[in-house]
Amino acid sequence: MRARRLWSPLAAAIAAVSMGLQACGDPGSAVDEPPPLAAGVEGAPTAQPGQAPAAGQTLRAVKARGYLLCGVHQGLLGFAYADNNGRWRGFDVDFCRATAAAVLGDGNAVRFIPTSSTDRFSALQSGEVDVLWRNTSGTFSRDATLNLAGVNYYDGQGFMAPRASGVRSAKDLDGARICIQTGSTNELNLTDWFRAHGLRYQPVVFDTEDKARSAYDREQCDALTADMSNLAAARVAMKRPDDHVLLPEIISKEPLGPVVRHGDDQWTDVVRWTLNATILAEELGITSQNLQAQRQSQSPEVRRLLGAEGGLGRMIGLQDDWAVKVIATSGNYGEIFERNLGAQTPLKLARGLNAPWNGAPSGLLFAAPMR
């Protein structure tokens, strides 16, 4: 199964793709301060009695501080990465900025805290970050110890293999060495899938995604497994992307979304409705470009979303025009997706499940109504 490959270092490829992605950009152009690093504490989320914040505590803390502390990926093309000017960009980054805009009226009032799969939950529980916008899968155990505040990307776990290996299906990986990152849902998914299909594999485990990708690049394994969005980013970063294939099997459900601490329902509402505002804006045809015209709309739904009537923002501690600031900063969900992940970006991801429920074709994106 071992394929012969010759590629330049992954870091060089990532730098080249990062330069290309700058053209996609995002609203705003200020350069961020160098972000502090998250504490390196290993482990999955665990219940920690006595650490739950009081209702409204996080919102008050963010307002008093004057900026949001947003936990993001350490570097994933399309989702969260620092460009050559040190400015954070990406799909999840745009949601960080949208949250800051909702709370503080300024999408640049945010500091980005890079977190790994092993330290992200401890960073959240310790208060080092206010929210994780970091491709985190919702599961029962995570929801029992933290608050899942919605789904901003529907994903699933898959496999990438060298084209020259002849592997065209995950079932061809019987006995294969598979590179995987520890501390994620991918480990259990992998074990379950191979066991269910009566196949064997040899895990080659690393503590970061970069190390797992680099090991695959060096042919230390026969395939790489991760969420399909991660694999698409990894493939783009290869010197010869066409030398690698994404296998057709999706072996898990990975509803990715923002995570906050237990015990502060108001803050959960703020984060959830920041996401919902982008989804509803796309559904209602509101974009960052027509936003000012839409503020004159006579549609009750549009008027409630944009704060022209209803006084709904005050119910969660925000100004009534909070959604206007969200959309002006980051755009609607479709704009965020296309700018960072869509057909005009190196990742070229299709909307698929991440299309609106009322689209053609339809997807899973659905937000509760503003009323």
Image (tube, grey):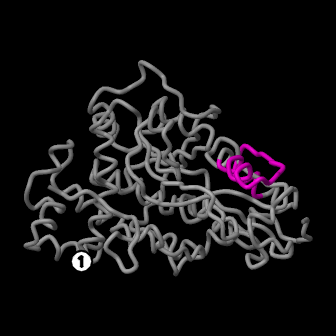
- Image quadrant where one finds the N terminus: bottom right
Instruction: State the image quarter where residue 326 is shown.
Output: bottom left
Q: Quadrant of residue 358?
A: bottom left
Position of residue 43 measured from the top left corner of the image (x, y, whole percent): 63, 32
Question: Could you tell whether 284 is left or right of 231 in the image?
Answer: left
- Badge count: 1
Residue drawn at (70%, 43%) of the image: 182
Q: Point out residue 257 in the picture as x, y percentages from the top left corner.
A: 45, 52
- Furthest residue toward top: 50
- In the picture, measured across the screen, residue 224 lies left or right of residue 51, that is right
When the figure is inspected, residue 337 is found, relative to residue 70, above or below; the finding is below
Q: Amino acid at mark 1?
A: Asn
Q: Along the line of sight, which residue is nearer the eye, 124 or 168?
A: 168
What are the residue bounds of the magenta stretch? 189-213
User: Quarter holding the C terminus?
Assistant: bottom left
User: At numbered mark 1, what does the secondary structure look like: helix, strand or loop?
Assistant: loop
- For this view, does 315 lie left or right of residue 9? left
Magenta segment includes 138 = no
In the picture shown, does residue 140 fall above or below 371?
above
- Above or below residue 164? Residue 216 is above
Give neighbour class at mark 1: few <14, some 14-19, many 20+ (Cα, 10 Å): few
Which residue, given by chain and number where applicable, does mark 1 sit on? 290
The residue depicted at 48 percent of the width and 54 percent of the height is 255
Q: Position of residue 204 (x, y in %)?
A: 81, 48
Q: Nearer the viewer, residue 89 or 119?
A: 119
> Taking 200 as reference, is 305 left or right?
left
